[in-house]
Amino acid sequence: MSKDAQEEKSLKLTVVAGLSGSGITTAINALEDLGFFCVDNLPPPLLPKLLDLAQGSERFTKLAIGLDARNVQDVGATKTLLEDLTQSSVEIEILFLEASEDVLLRRFSVSRRTHPLSRFGLPIAEAIQTERLIMHPVRERANQILDSSDLNVHECKRLVQSFATG
């Protein structure tokens, strides 16, 4: 990308996508600590409106959103939306977080939180597998994939921040 094209893309959007329980909230918090304006669980159809509001604002030059199975109803439309936005004046980077099934099962067990897809009556293991399939097209588009299976919260935060600044 030429220097002029980079200057045109004055708005940076980091999409933190991934599997529930893999560290999306930790990543969003890490980016917020770097001065990003962050919105977790924003329905993708609202993203263009958020970007319109942020355009031209000195306060909102770095945005981050969190995406997982809770807010991605149509992954094909979400992928198309992200591709279309890439052609606009917005610099978009996608960080995809994932973890092994065993680790995700343990994290949900320890936190006593339910998986977002469990509301459809899916057992936790099946919910994790279903979400992995749902989110796969976004994973394919990611600039960076971070497996948080062997990371603690502090290590995950440090890696996310190095991705955002590097």
Image: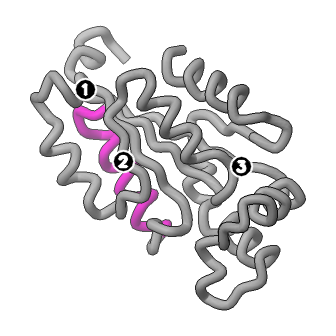
Name the residue beneath numbered marker 2.
Answer: 39
Left or right of 151? Residue 87 is: left
Whether residue 80 appears in magenta in the rendering, the answer is: yes
Mark sitting earlier along the chain (3/1): 1
Instruction: Classify mark 2: helix, strand or loop.
Output: strand
Residue that lies at the very extreme toward the bottom in this rendered image: 121
Contact (Cβ within 8 Å) of mark 2 with mark 3: no
Quadrant of the rendered structure where residue 89 is? Answer: top left
Q: Where residue 9 sits in the image (x, y, percent)?
A: 25, 25
Question: What amino acid type is highlighted by mark number 3?
Answer: Glu
Stretch in magenta = 75-90
Q: Nearer the viewer, residue 24 or 88?
A: 24
Contact (Cβ within 8 Å) of mark 2 with mark 1: no
Calculate the distance from the C-alpha at mark 3 to the C-alpha at mark 1.
27 Å
Whether residue 139 appears in magenta in the rendering, the answer is: no
Calculate the distance from the C-alpha at mark 2 to the C-alpha at mark 3.
19 Å
Question: In which quadrant of the rendered image does the C terminus lie?
Answer: top right
Q: Main secondary structure of the magenta part?
A: helix
Mark sitting earlier along the chain (2/1): 2
Q: Where residue 62 sits in the image (x, y, percent)?
A: 32, 28
**Disc number for residue 61:** 1
**Disc number for residue 98:** 3
